[in-house]
Amino acid sequence: MRKLLALLLMVLAQPAWAQSPTPGTVLDAAVNQVIRPAMAEFKRSASGLESAMGGLCVLPSVDTLAVAHRQFEQAALAYGGIEFIRIGPLMEENRVDRLLFFPDRKGIGLRQVQAILAEKDATASSVTSLREKSVAAQGFGALEFVLYGTGAEELSTVEGQFRCRYGQAIAANVSSIADELAMGWYRYDGVAAHLTRPDPSYADYRTPIEALEQIVGLVSHGIEGTRDARIKPFIANGDAAAKPKQALFWRSGLTMAMIEANVEGMRRLIEVSGIAREVEEKDKALDNSIAFEFSNAQRAIDLVTLPVEQAVADEKQAHALDYLVLVTGSLQNQIGEQLSAALGLSVGFSSLDGD
Amino acid sequence: MWQRRAFLKAAGVGFAASLLPRQAVALERSELVFASSVQTATGGYGAVLLGERGDLIASIDLPDRGHDITISPQAGRGVVFARQPGTFAVVFDPAGREAPVTLTSVEGRHFFGHGVFSPDGSLLYATESDFEAAQGVIGVYDVTNGYRRISEFLTHGTGPHEMLLMPDGITFVVANGGIETHPDFGRAELNLETMDPSVVFIDRRDGRLIGQLRLDAGLHQLSIRHMAVDARGRVWFGCQYKGTPTDSPQLVGYATMDGEISLVELPPGTLADLRNYVGSVAVSADGKTVAVSSPEGDLLVAIDAEGKRPVLVETLRNGCGLAADGIGFVATSGEGAMIGIAGAEREVQKFDFLFDNHMLRV
């Protein structure tokens, strides 16, 4: 009898749409219209980065260095659009850290990259042996220093041969991981199939509700991560001064572009999947509210036009960054709590990592 | 175990008198009392005392989300610790005679959500993070002197989570989860590649390290987080795996003060349903059964401590809180449900608040 009651309790906790076909539509759109294309775009741009680094090493010049810079920007921002999709292949084989070891609170990556460059460590110029090194020396963070850090100007001359070959190996590593991500998402019977067609026999997604919880959770936790690890660490907080050099990609000037890529990736997932429209009549305004808050975030990002070191010292732009913290907090609440509740989901009041 | 009579004695005669009539009746009817942090229907946070039948005996408000609770009959006080990386702990008088007092973590430290009192109730210990050094510590607080922080001991690891006082009353066991976090970066996990989780035994009198146990090196991403002590003094622990999600390492094991550490073999199906995440561990009143929960997998598993094999598997959506009932266990969920398992005869109840990860039998 008690088991029956427990079952009843579980059923009562499900949203009305748990019995409708709508979750399948949302999940299909999330995977096939957002996640898979974004993975393919990352693969394409990472491949372009690898080619550009190859070109730079063969023919070092100001022009080929500029091409490499542009390809770095494209690949990094493409990754910015998917890095919140922390399921499936991205979570395997330390790929998150191998692609971008950040935050690097103790400056481990910087020290390792500087040592590799100073010693001309030949094992770092081969992608095979580079993969055996620390994650901090083989991803976007390391490549940013190679391309924009102290001494990067030598890349446009033959003097920068080793530095370039190290950068080329990093780019090849990034490209290889991007291939693995795309293949993982397009694999038959892989995460895409499980997420769009949940089944009780699967270890990852047994029901449509679990799959939907995952989609909402990705955005809720992604927004939290962008705010806590990408914005708050470098802005002033009370008596604590701003620390612009704690910002991701401050050397390349891509700090805000990366934040924008993060936010836009999450906005697209919510918008294109239509998940916030699949609520009861009384909650229909939520979709607009979320869209409005995403547009507020975009407006705040657009206001920050100076390099972060100057932006944090500029009253208007520092204010925009403070506002961005508030807006992302509001988005986390809207998506993680209000939308979850409206959908009858639980994005883990007691299942948040690390508790 | 602190049952109703001891609870009343510790709380003093003023307790029942200070309660609302309905709550006083609830307490009178309760042989057992349970405590948990909760999220209220309005989105606020608090902690509740529940009677044996799930009747609400008392509640307090919290400034933010709480986690585990510890209560000392001797001190006549309970403490709710903020969920990591929180900076507050609220000391409350179960009798309701005095207003709650909020403690704040000292500069450079934050709480990890767990702690214990000394047997005589004169000292409070809390797992904390020295986050600049990425080093776990146990903060030591003088209960008799306004909870002044008087000392700290190293936990010899990063990211300490649950700590327990062993039955000898002088040894702590601490689960060093191995994960580095820093308040500058919220809950971001900063060292997944180099995690080094361990179980440590520490002398509570001077902080001396008695022993440190690690699982095989290949399991360095298996974060050891929650524990309970069985009838034989073995420390059962539950883990959360931070490696490749498609890996499926064993998640439950035990450690002893003799230096043994071992994972038990759960069947593949049960293990898969735990989703690489154990959120809470409890031992039954007779110390012979261990229960673990996974809110990620909506699963509760009871394990025979002697046979080291599951004797019951039950589903509870978002279920995490576990505490020994008279027989079996009480289990609670992040959706406000409370059920009994493994022999506990109790009706399924639904509350208008959501239970946090841990349920304490007081």
Image: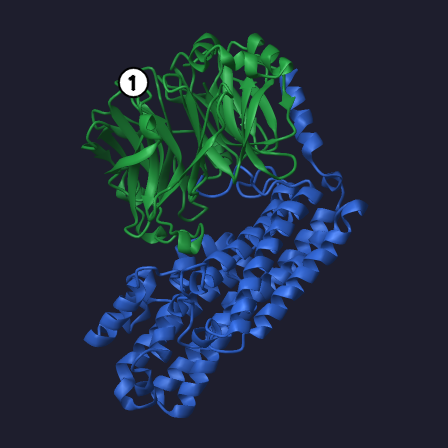
Chain colours: A blue, B green
Q: Is B153 drawn above or below residue B8 in the view shown?
A: below
The image quadrant that residue A347 belongs to is top right
Q: Position of residue B205 (x, y in %)?
A: 21, 27
Q: Position of residue B9 (x, y in %)?
A: 44, 10
Residue A81 visible in the snapshot: no
Q: Residue tagged by mark 1?
A: B167
Tell me if B99 is positioned left or right of A158 in this view. Answer: right
Residue B73 visible in the snapshot: yes
Q: Chain of mark 1?
A: B
Q: Is B304 drawn above or below residue A216 in the view shown?
A: above
Observer-nearest of B174 and B106 = B106
**Crowding near pointer 1: few (<14 within 10 Å), some, many (20+)?**
some
Q: Is A66 drawn above or below residue B305 in the view shown?
A: below
Image quadrant containing the N terminus of chain A: top right
Q: Position of residue B287 (x, y in %)?
A: 38, 15
Say which residue appears at 53% left-offset and 24% top-offset: B331
Residue type, label 1: Pro
Which structural element holds mark 1?
loop
